[in-house]
Image (cartoon, grey):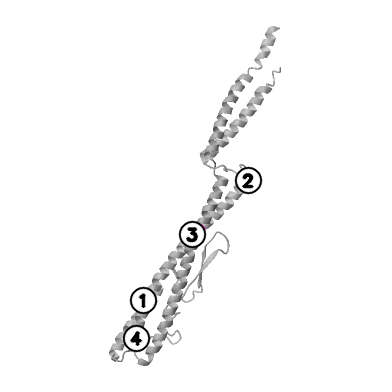
Amino acid sequence: MRLSHNLASMNVYRSYSKALEKQSGALDRISSGNKLNRAVDNPNALAQSEKMRIQIRGMQMAQRNMQDGMSMLQTAEGGLDGMTSMLQRMRELTVQAGSGTNTEEDKKVIQSEIDQMVQGIDSLADGTEFNGVKLLKIDAGDTKTVLDMATGANVDEKIQINRFNLTSGGDLKLIDDVTGKSNVDVTTSAGVGKVLETLDNAINTALSIRSEYGALENRFESSVKGSNEITEKLISADGSLREADIAEEMMEFAKGNILIEAGNAMMVQSNKFPQDILRILDRR
């Protein structure tokens, strides 16, 4: 029996400290909802979780990019729809101008409406833009003919959107870009057939671009759905790595309570052991 070192009490205190530390950890996990709050908790699992979160956030931003891409293509679709209607009206007027019952004055009136339609197409091409980006017109000096839309969290995961110059002097070729003369002049009977050919080519060009944008819109929509599914799986995996099981932690917390209370009781008893020395001394 030793007075200076109460080993029994020290052993009880050591167990008590361990139980208190475990209970404190359980309380930390319960209050935060995470079992990984610091790197010391599980360095490898924390690294995996952070990598997953980088991927998740990148994919969520890519989804917003794709939503913007769909909105931009829908805006372009509206402009192309208006252009197609104007071109069809111009073709209708051209066929009307080919009638032998028209006077020269009638043809001039028809030509005046066609000219207004050409100006309307130019205005539509110039005004069809999304957040300042024009898809149906490329200004002089603008060499960017392709827009890259990020569709994933990693490098080179992208969809390219082609830009076009659907002005009267551009891809529609309603005006000769060299001479500046109109290619849709119906004031002469000899020019009606050529004008119809020009308008047919312009309509086919507009419809081809419209189909391309429609296909891209479908691709964006499918990519968004696929990205959502992948993101959900990653979030689930990250939750398994990082989030605490509250029921399990409450069991650990309750267990700690019992051990701490038992430790307190045992320390009270073990601290009385040195008093036995007094009894020995009394007997002497």
Give the SS element for disc 1: helix
User: Camera-side residue: 98 or 139?
Assistant: 98
- How far apart are labels 2 and 4 at the CA level? 77 Å
Crowd band around label 3 with a 10 angstrom C-alpha radius: few (<14), some (14–19), many (20+): few
User: Camera-side residue: 279 or 228?
Assistant: 228
| Labels 3, 2: front one | 3
Relative image position of residue 78 (x, y in whole percent): 39, 70
Mark before the other along the chain sequence, 3 or 2: 2
Crowd band around label 1 with a 10 angstrom C-alpha radius: few (<14), some (14–19), many (20+): some
Q: Which residue is mark 2?
A: 43
| Labels 1, 3: front one | 3
The range drawn in magenta is 223-227
Q: Which residue is mark 3?
A: 225
- Residue 32 shows up from this direction: yes
Q: Quadrant of residue 129?
A: bottom left
Give the SS element for disc 4: helix
Q: Which residue is mark 4?
A: 95
Does the CB distance between marks 4 and 1 fall below 8 Å? no
Amino acid type of the residue that numbered disc 2 sits on in the rendered structure:
Pro
Q: Is residue 233 above or below residue 38?
A: below
